[in-house]
Image: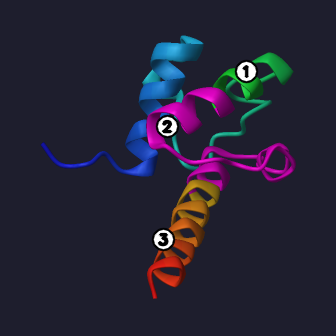
Amino acid sequence: MSELTAYETLVAIFRDELAIDPARVHPDASLIGELGFDSVAFAIGLVSIEEQLGLTLEQDELILCKTVGDIVRLIEETRDRVALSDVGATA
């Protein structure tokens, strides 16, 4: 089975951990306005993302995310930073 994309993983987290209907989730969906995020949802989402993807996201960066797409970009940027630091560590 192939690795899920950041977006697919995020949709699954929203569904399983936050009980958000996946039909409501799209890249431009507003976290607060459309999906009803509050501080608890952000905290649960942060922990779930970190556990499922094995990444450490900066809370101050996550708080700046306004849409689902923003979180996907943050995940991808964090993955890229980790990959670059791993390459540098083995060089």
Q: CA–CA distance between discs 3 and 2? A: 20 Å
Read off the residue under disc 3.
Answer: 83
Estimate the x, y position of residue 65 in percent, counting from the top left. 77, 49
The answer to whether the residues at label 3 and label 2 have Cβ atoms under 8 Å apart is: no
**Cα distance, mark 1 to mark 3?**
28 Å
Which residues lie in the magenta part?
Answer: 46-72
Taking the magenta stretch, the answer to whether it contains residue 55 is: yes
Q: Name the residue under label 1.
A: 41
Three-letter amino acid code of the residue under disc 2: Leu
Q: Which of marks 1 and 3 is nearer the N terminus?
A: 1
x and y, in percent, of residue 67 in the image: 69, 46
First in residue order: circle 1 vs circle 2: 2
Residue at x-position 83% and y-position 21%: 38
How far across and how far down the image is residue 14, in percent?
Answer: 53, 24
Left or right: residue 90 versus residue 84 is: left
Q: What residue type is labelled 3?
A: Ala
- Secondary structure under the numbered disc 3 in the rendered image: helix
Q: In this view, does 19 lie to the left or right of 38?
A: left
For image coordinates 45% across by 46% down, the residue present is: 7
Front-lying residue, 44 or 26: 44
